[in-house]
Protein backbone atom coordinates (compact mmCIF):
# COMPACT_ATOMS: atom_id res chain seq x y z
CA UNK A 1 0.00 0.00 0.00
CA UNK A 2 1.38 3.40 -0.95
CA UNK A 3 1.56 5.66 2.07
CA UNK A 4 1.79 9.35 2.80
CA UNK A 5 5.18 10.84 3.59
CA UNK A 6 4.79 10.50 7.36
CA UNK A 7 3.52 6.92 6.93
CA UNK A 8 6.65 5.66 5.14
CA UNK A 9 8.23 3.95 8.17
CA UNK A 10 4.94 2.15 8.81
CA UNK A 11 4.53 1.09 5.18
CA UNK A 12 8.13 -0.16 5.04
CA UNK A 13 7.64 -2.25 8.18
CA UNK A 14 4.34 -3.64 6.83
CA UNK A 15 6.14 -4.64 3.63
CA UNK A 16 8.90 -6.30 5.63
CA UNK A 17 6.35 -8.36 7.59
CA UNK A 18 4.62 -9.39 4.35
CA UNK A 19 7.98 -10.44 2.87
CA UNK A 20 8.85 -12.48 5.98
CA UNK A 21 5.48 -14.25 5.85
CA UNK A 22 5.87 -14.94 2.15
CA UNK A 23 9.39 -16.29 2.60
CA UNK A 24 8.28 -18.42 5.56
CA UNK A 25 5.49 -20.04 3.53
CA UNK A 26 7.53 -20.46 0.37
CA UNK A 27 10.63 -21.93 2.03
CA UNK A 28 8.75 -23.71 4.84
CA UNK A 29 10.86 -21.92 7.44
CA UNK A 30 9.53 -20.95 10.87
CA UNK A 31 9.95 -17.20 11.28
CA UNK A 32 7.21 -16.75 13.85
CA UNK A 33 9.45 -15.00 16.40
CA UNK A 34 10.79 -12.52 13.83
CA UNK A 35 7.29 -11.81 12.47
CA UNK A 36 5.82 -11.30 15.96
CA UNK A 37 8.68 -8.99 16.90
CA UNK A 38 8.11 -6.88 13.78
CA UNK A 39 4.36 -6.86 14.41
CA UNK A 40 4.91 -5.51 17.93
CA UNK A 41 7.21 -2.81 16.56
CA UNK A 42 4.60 -1.97 13.91
CA UNK A 43 1.80 -1.54 16.45
CA UNK A 44 3.99 0.68 18.62
CA UNK A 45 5.06 2.74 15.60
CA UNK A 46 1.44 3.20 14.46
CA UNK A 47 0.48 4.63 17.84
CA UNK A 48 3.53 6.92 17.88
CA UNK A 49 2.60 8.32 14.46
CA UNK A 50 -1.21 8.33 14.42
CA UNK A 51 -1.80 9.39 18.02
CA UNK A 52 0.17 12.58 17.42
CA UNK A 53 -0.98 13.78 14.01
CA UNK A 54 -0.69 17.46 13.14
CA UNK A 55 -3.64 19.28 11.53
CA UNK A 56 -1.83 19.21 8.17
CA UNK A 57 -1.29 15.45 8.42
CA UNK A 58 -5.02 15.00 9.10
CA UNK A 59 -5.75 17.05 5.97
CA UNK A 60 -3.53 14.67 4.01
CA UNK A 61 -5.40 11.65 5.40
CA UNK A 62 -8.74 13.30 4.57
CA UNK A 63 -7.54 13.52 0.96
CA UNK A 64 -6.16 9.96 0.81
CA UNK A 65 -7.12 8.45 -2.57
CA UNK A 66 -8.11 5.15 -0.92
CA UNK A 67 -10.43 6.79 1.63
CA UNK A 68 -14.07 5.56 1.51
CA UNK A 69 -16.43 7.86 -0.41
CA UNK A 70 -20.18 8.38 -0.23
CA UNK A 71 -21.11 5.38 -2.42
CA UNK A 72 -18.89 3.14 -0.27
CA UNK A 73 -20.77 4.21 2.87
CA UNK A 74 -24.11 3.75 1.13
CA UNK A 75 -23.15 0.20 0.18
CA UNK A 76 -21.86 -0.68 3.66
CA UNK A 77 -24.47 1.14 5.77
CA UNK A 78 -27.77 0.90 3.90
CA UNK A 79 -29.99 -1.38 1.87
CA UNK A 80 -32.44 -0.81 -0.98
CA UNK A 81 -30.61 2.28 -2.26
CA UNK A 82 -32.41 3.77 -5.24
CA UNK A 83 -30.41 6.57 -6.86
CA UNK A 84 -32.26 9.58 -8.25
CA UNK A 85 -30.80 11.79 -10.98
CA UNK A 86 -31.07 15.29 -12.39
CA UNK A 87 -32.08 18.74 -11.23
CA UNK A 88 -35.05 19.06 -13.66
CA UNK A 89 -33.45 22.21 -15.07
CA UNK A 90 -30.15 21.42 -16.81
CA UNK A 91 -28.56 17.99 -16.27
CA UNK A 92 -27.45 15.39 -13.77
CA UNK A 93 -24.27 16.20 -11.84
CA UNK A 94 -22.27 13.06 -10.95
CA UNK A 95 -20.32 15.00 -8.28
CA UNK A 96 -23.38 14.63 -6.04
CA UNK A 97 -25.22 11.34 -5.64
CA UNK A 98 -28.44 10.74 -3.77
CA UNK A 99 -31.57 8.71 -3.38
CA UNK A 100 -33.81 6.78 -1.03
CA UNK A 101 -32.33 4.01 1.11
CA UNK A 102 -33.00 2.07 4.30
CA UNK A 103 -30.86 2.44 7.41
CA UNK A 104 -31.88 -0.86 8.94
CA UNK A 105 -35.68 -0.34 9.17
CA UNK A 106 -35.60 3.46 8.85
CA UNK A 107 -36.23 4.92 5.39
CA UNK A 108 -33.90 7.87 4.68
CA UNK A 109 -32.91 10.20 1.87
CA UNK A 110 -29.13 9.95 1.55
CA UNK A 111 -27.13 12.55 -0.40
CA UNK A 112 -23.38 13.16 -0.70
CA UNK A 113 -20.41 14.36 -2.67
CA UNK A 114 -18.74 11.66 -4.75
CA UNK A 115 -15.12 11.63 -5.94
CA UNK A 116 -13.51 9.23 -8.40
CA UNK A 117 -10.95 6.48 -7.90
CA UNK A 118 -8.97 7.17 -11.07
CA UNK A 119 -8.39 10.02 -13.50
CA UNK A 120 -11.26 9.06 -15.79
CA UNK A 121 -13.80 8.84 -12.99
CA UNK A 122 -12.49 11.99 -11.32
CA UNK A 123 -13.00 13.91 -14.55
CA UNK A 124 -16.51 12.47 -14.78
CA UNK A 125 -17.27 13.52 -11.20
CA UNK A 126 -15.32 16.82 -11.32
CA UNK A 127 -13.07 15.57 -8.49
CA UNK A 128 -16.08 15.79 -6.17
CA UNK A 129 -16.64 19.50 -6.90
CA UNK A 130 -20.32 20.02 -7.78
CA UNK A 131 -21.75 22.33 -10.42
CA UNK A 132 -24.90 24.36 -9.63
CA UNK A 133 -27.07 21.56 -11.00
CA UNK A 134 -25.57 19.28 -8.37
CA UNK A 135 -26.78 21.53 -5.57
CA UNK A 136 -30.16 21.93 -7.27
CA UNK A 137 -30.45 18.16 -7.55
CA UNK A 138 -29.61 17.82 -3.86
CA UNK A 139 -32.26 20.39 -2.93
CA UNK A 140 -34.84 18.69 -5.15
CA UNK A 141 -34.21 15.42 -3.30
CA UNK A 142 -34.42 17.14 0.08
CA UNK A 143 -37.73 18.73 -0.86
CA UNK A 144 -38.99 15.31 -1.93
CA UNK A 145 -37.87 13.80 1.38
CA UNK A 146 -39.62 16.59 3.32
CA UNK A 147 -42.87 16.01 1.45
CA UNK A 148 -42.68 12.30 2.24
CA UNK A 149 -41.65 12.90 5.88
CA UNK A 150 -38.37 11.04 5.42
CA UNK A 151 -35.26 12.14 7.38
CA UNK A 152 -32.18 13.26 5.45
CA UNK A 153 -28.54 12.18 5.81
CA UNK A 154 -25.81 14.00 3.88
CA UNK A 155 -22.14 13.11 3.41
CA UNK A 156 -19.74 16.01 2.90
CA UNK A 157 -16.52 15.33 0.99
CA UNK A 158 -15.46 18.05 -1.44
CA UNK A 159 -12.49 20.39 -1.91
CA UNK A 160 -15.07 23.03 -2.88
CA UNK A 161 -17.71 23.84 -5.45
CA UNK A 162 -16.64 23.67 -9.11
CA UNK A 163 -14.89 27.00 -9.90
CA UNK A 164 -15.29 27.07 -13.70
CA UNK A 165 -16.79 29.88 -15.76
CA UNK A 166 -19.65 27.67 -16.92
CA UNK A 167 -20.64 26.98 -13.31
CA UNK A 168 -20.64 30.69 -12.53
CA UNK A 169 -22.74 31.37 -15.62
CA UNK A 170 -25.35 28.90 -14.39
CA UNK A 171 -25.56 30.48 -10.94
CA UNK A 172 -23.15 28.60 -8.68
CA UNK A 173 -23.31 31.12 -5.82
CA UNK A 174 -27.09 31.42 -6.03
CA UNK A 175 -27.54 27.64 -6.00
CA UNK A 176 -25.47 27.30 -2.81
CA UNK A 177 -27.15 30.28 -1.14
CA UNK A 178 -30.58 28.89 -2.01
CA UNK A 179 -29.66 25.55 -0.41
CA UNK A 180 -28.47 27.27 2.77
CA UNK A 181 -31.80 29.03 3.14
CA UNK A 182 -34.00 26.09 2.23
CA UNK A 183 -32.11 23.53 4.32
CA UNK A 184 -32.57 25.79 7.34
CA UNK A 185 -36.35 25.52 6.83
CA UNK A 186 -36.70 21.77 6.29
CA UNK A 187 -39.33 20.14 8.48
CA UNK A 188 -37.58 16.76 8.70
CA UNK A 189 -34.42 15.78 10.62
CA UNK A 190 -31.12 16.42 8.83
CA UNK A 191 -27.88 14.71 9.90
CA UNK A 192 -24.68 15.86 8.20
CA UNK A 193 -21.50 13.75 8.24
CA UNK A 194 -18.16 15.24 7.14
CA UNK A 195 -16.36 12.14 5.85
CA UNK A 196 -13.32 13.71 4.17
CA UNK A 197 -12.79 17.19 2.85
CA UNK A 198 -15.21 19.88 3.95
CA UNK A 199 -14.30 22.73 1.64
CA UNK A 200 -15.99 26.11 2.05
CA UNK A 201 -19.37 26.79 0.36
CA UNK A 202 -19.01 23.58 -1.63
CA UNK A 203 -19.46 21.71 1.65
CA UNK A 204 -22.10 24.03 3.12
CA UNK A 205 -24.33 23.55 0.06
CA UNK A 206 -25.44 20.23 1.58
CA UNK A 207 -24.13 20.87 5.10
CA UNK A 208 -26.88 22.68 7.03
CA UNK A 209 -28.33 20.21 9.51
CA UNK A 210 -29.66 19.51 12.99
CA UNK A 211 -26.57 17.45 13.84
CA UNK A 212 -23.10 17.85 12.30
CA UNK A 213 -20.92 14.77 12.71
CA UNK A 214 -17.31 14.56 11.60
CA UNK A 215 -14.86 11.73 11.14
CA UNK A 216 -11.68 11.95 13.21
CA UNK A 217 -9.39 12.63 10.24
CA UNK A 218 -11.73 14.79 8.16
CA UNK A 219 -11.43 18.57 7.98
CA UNK A 220 -13.98 21.36 7.67
CA UNK A 221 -12.87 24.84 6.65
CA UNK A 222 -13.86 28.12 5.03
CA UNK A 223 -10.76 27.80 2.80
CA UNK A 224 -8.16 25.14 2.05
CA UNK A 225 -4.83 25.39 3.91
CA UNK A 226 -3.09 25.98 0.57
CA UNK A 227 -5.50 28.78 -0.33
CA UNK A 228 -5.05 30.43 3.06
CA UNK A 229 -1.26 30.17 2.81
CA UNK A 230 -1.27 31.64 -0.69
CA UNK A 231 -3.20 34.67 0.59
CA UNK A 232 -1.31 35.25 3.83
CA UNK A 233 2.23 34.19 2.90
CA UNK A 234 2.09 34.31 -0.91
CA UNK A 235 3.19 30.67 -1.05
CA UNK A 236 1.56 27.28 -0.57
CA UNK A 237 4.64 26.13 1.33
CA UNK A 238 3.06 27.47 4.53
CA UNK A 239 0.01 25.20 4.21
CA UNK A 240 0.91 23.22 7.38
CA UNK A 241 1.08 26.47 9.37
CA UNK A 242 -2.25 27.59 7.88
CA UNK A 243 -3.89 24.25 8.72
CA UNK A 244 -2.96 24.69 12.38
CA UNK A 245 -4.14 28.32 12.48
CA UNK A 246 -7.49 27.62 10.80
CA UNK A 247 -8.68 25.16 13.50
CA UNK A 248 -10.11 22.75 10.94
CA UNK A 249 -9.81 19.38 12.68
CA UNK A 250 -12.64 17.50 14.36
CA UNK A 251 -11.20 18.11 17.83
CA UNK A 252 -10.88 21.86 17.21
CA UNK A 253 -14.37 22.18 15.74
CA UNK A 254 -15.94 20.14 18.53
CA UNK A 255 -14.31 22.43 21.11
CA UNK A 256 -15.61 25.45 19.19
CA UNK A 257 -19.11 23.88 19.05
CA UNK A 258 -19.19 24.01 15.25
CA UNK A 259 -19.81 20.25 15.09
CA UNK A 260 -21.77 18.03 17.46
CA UNK A 261 -19.81 14.78 17.43
CA UNK A 262 -16.40 13.39 16.45
CA UNK A 263 -16.52 9.86 15.03
CA UNK A 264 -13.35 7.80 15.70
CA UNK A 265 -11.58 6.09 12.81
CA UNK A 266 -9.51 2.91 12.75
CA UNK A 267 -5.86 3.47 13.66
CA UNK A 268 -4.24 4.97 10.57
CA UNK A 269 -7.41 6.30 8.97
CA UNK A 270 -10.72 5.24 7.43
CA UNK A 271 -8.98 3.85 4.33
CA UNK A 272 -7.43 1.07 6.43
CA UNK A 273 -10.74 -0.53 7.44
CA UNK A 274 -13.89 0.34 5.47
CA UNK A 275 -16.33 -1.91 7.41
CA UNK A 276 -15.17 -0.67 10.82
CA UNK A 277 -15.41 2.97 9.74
CA UNK A 278 -18.85 2.48 8.18
CA UNK A 279 -20.08 0.73 11.34
CA UNK A 280 -18.97 3.69 13.46
CA UNK A 281 -20.63 6.19 11.11
CA UNK A 282 -23.83 4.14 10.99
CA UNK A 283 -24.04 3.92 14.78
CA UNK A 284 -23.55 7.68 15.14
CA UNK A 285 -26.11 8.50 12.44
CA UNK A 286 -28.72 6.14 13.91
CA UNK A 287 -28.22 7.49 17.41
CA UNK A 288 -28.65 11.09 16.31
CA UNK A 289 -31.59 10.34 14.02
CA UNK A 290 -33.42 8.53 16.82
CA UNK A 291 -33.07 11.60 19.04
CA UNK A 292 -34.17 13.99 16.29
CA UNK A 293 -37.21 11.92 15.31
CA UNK A 294 -38.62 12.51 18.80
CA UNK A 295 -38.72 16.27 18.21
CA UNK A 296 -42.05 17.53 16.81
CA UNK A 297 -41.69 18.74 13.21
CA UNK A 298 -42.64 22.38 13.94
CA UNK A 299 -39.78 22.63 16.45
CA UNK A 300 -37.04 21.26 14.21
CA UNK A 301 -36.51 24.35 12.08
CA UNK A 302 -36.54 26.62 15.14
CA UNK A 303 -33.96 24.50 16.96
CA UNK A 304 -31.84 24.42 13.78
CA UNK A 305 -32.02 28.21 13.61
CA UNK A 306 -30.99 28.54 17.25
CA UNK A 307 -28.13 26.10 16.71
CA UNK A 308 -26.54 28.21 13.98
CA UNK A 309 -27.26 31.52 15.73
CA UNK A 310 -25.29 30.26 18.74
CA UNK A 311 -22.12 29.62 16.71
CA UNK A 312 -19.33 32.16 17.09
CA UNK A 313 -18.10 34.69 19.63
CA UNK A 314 -18.47 38.43 19.80
CA UNK A 315 -18.14 41.40 22.13
CA UNK A 316 -20.16 44.58 22.38
Image (spheres, grey):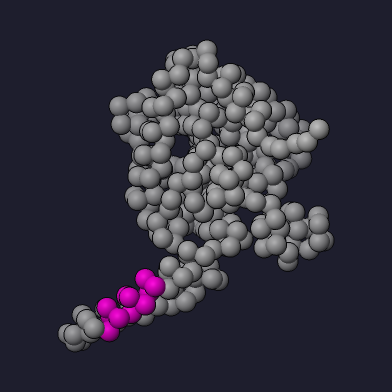
Query: x, y (%) of residue 217?
Result: 51, 54
Query: x, y (%) of residue 286?
Result: 38, 33
Image position of 53 with respect to 188: above or below: below
Query: x, y (%) of residue 60?
Result: 57, 60
Q: Which quarter of the figure is the C terminus placed in?
A: top right
Image position of 110 with respect to 73: above or below: above
Q: Nearer the viewer, residue 155 or 167?
A: 155
Which residue is found at the position 35% from the left and 35% from the top? Answer: 78
Q: Nearer the viewer, residue 300 or 201?
A: 300
**Does the magenta stretch mainly form a helix, a strand or a loop?**
helix
Query: x, y (%) of residue 57?
Result: 57, 62
Q: Is residue 253 left or right of residue 20?
A: right
Quarter of image, res 11:
bottom left
Part of the protein shown in magenta: 34-44
**Furthest-front residue in view?**
316
Which residue is found at the position 37% from the left and 56% from the top? Answer: 273
Image position of 300 with respect to 47: above or below: above
Amino acid sequence: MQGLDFERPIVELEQKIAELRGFSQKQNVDLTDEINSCAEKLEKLKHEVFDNLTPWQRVQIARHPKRPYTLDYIQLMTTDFYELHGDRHFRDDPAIVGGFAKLDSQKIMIIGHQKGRDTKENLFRSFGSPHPEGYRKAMRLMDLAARMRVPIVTFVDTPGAYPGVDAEERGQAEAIAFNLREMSRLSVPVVVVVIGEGGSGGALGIGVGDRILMLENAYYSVISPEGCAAILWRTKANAPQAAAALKITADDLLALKIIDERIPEPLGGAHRDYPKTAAAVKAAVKRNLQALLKIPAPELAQKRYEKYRSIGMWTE
